[in-house]
Amino acid sequence: MAFFTLVIAALIGAETLNPGDHNRKLTVDGRERNFLVHIPPKYDPKKPTPVILAFHGGGANASNMVAFSNLNDKSDKSGFIVVYPNGSGRQEKILSFNGGNCCAYAMNNKIDDVEFTRKILDNLAKSANIDPKRIYATGISNGGIMCYLLASELSERIAAIAPVGGPMGTSYCNPKRPVSVIHFHGTDDEFAPFKGGKGKGFTGTEFYSVDHSIQAWIKANGCNKTPSILNIPDNSKDGTTITRKTFGSGKDNSEVVLIEIHGGGHTWPGQEPRLKSLGKSTKNISANDLMWEFFQKHPIR
């Protein structure tokens, strides 16, 4: 009871967020930044609620990410809050995040998107009852790259991550605590190639490989080097098949999971691609379902 009283007291004087969609603004390093917040219908201000940060891809924006991922629907069913940060850029709707070696405006102007994320969480905590041990991050492409940077540089606040089609954007990681990872990536991704190198698109980024990302986090988390392998049944017959590789037994029960989508493109598993040029999107799995199941297993301990 005392805890609830403290939470309510902390929210007095702040704008309390009710179920629905909200557009929020704050200032970081003299720049006005903004982000969208989706509060699910089941939200109870008396209960600490999990949060998923969902980062859009390079050249997109938060509103695009809402439609691209369909995470609001999963939020409404499962009861977590979703936050969609907007990157930065010269044009209002063509934005990027500085994830290390990518991307575009944000990288070239050395925008501190780790500090932006930290301030988002501080701001959100004043207006909603969020659970500090269950803050997670996901994102597509440049947004996935951003997830990896947060896991390394903001590990005291990010419990686990689920990058989609976005490898690590740095040569190494240095988290203060183990951060579990579930990475989704299509083997036919032409924009962030599975094996690394330059992909299609406007960034010209020399991407690290998916294997580089997985191996770095196996080492950081102290996981088994040999995975358990599961072939997911091919029920959709859509030209894709799924292999799940789990590197377990890490520190504090951490693990690293690779969802290898054979034949998959630069897409969000379980969702229709918005552009055919992005390649195939598997229907054999739902990224939203799998990441939420994974996140629930991996709070900060």
Image: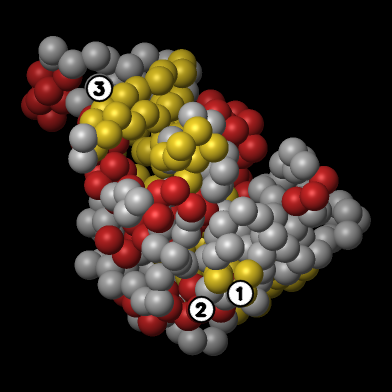
Instruction: Give the numbered dot on residue 196.
Output: 1
Pointer 3 or 2: first along the chain: 3
User: Could you tell me how far apart the alpha carbons at marks 3 and 2 are, in whole angstroms?
Assistant: 38 Å
Q: Is residue 100 left or right of residue 138?
A: left
| Disc 2: which residue | 212
In the depicted structure, whether residue 124 falls above or below residue 160: above
Residue 60 in percent (x, y) is at: 57, 39
What is the quadrant of the N terminus in the image? Answer: top left
Residue 297 lies in quadrant: bottom left
- Left/right placement of residue 245 relative to residue 294 reads right
Query: Which residue shows up at 54% across the image and 87% down it?
Result: 226
The alpha-carbon separation of the residues under discs 1 and 2 comes to 9 Å
Q: Earlier in the sequence, mark 1 or mark 2?
A: 1
Q: Residue placed at 81% from the left, 64% from the top?
A: 263
Quadrant of the image containing the C terminus? bottom left
Whether residue 115 is visible: yes
**SS at mark 1?**
loop
CA distance for labels 3 and 1: 41 Å
Disc 2 secondary structure class: helix
Residue pictured at 55% horizontal, 65% vertical:
205
13 left or right of 180 in image: left
Q: Quadrant of residue 161?
A: bottom left
Q: Which residue is mark 3?
A: 127
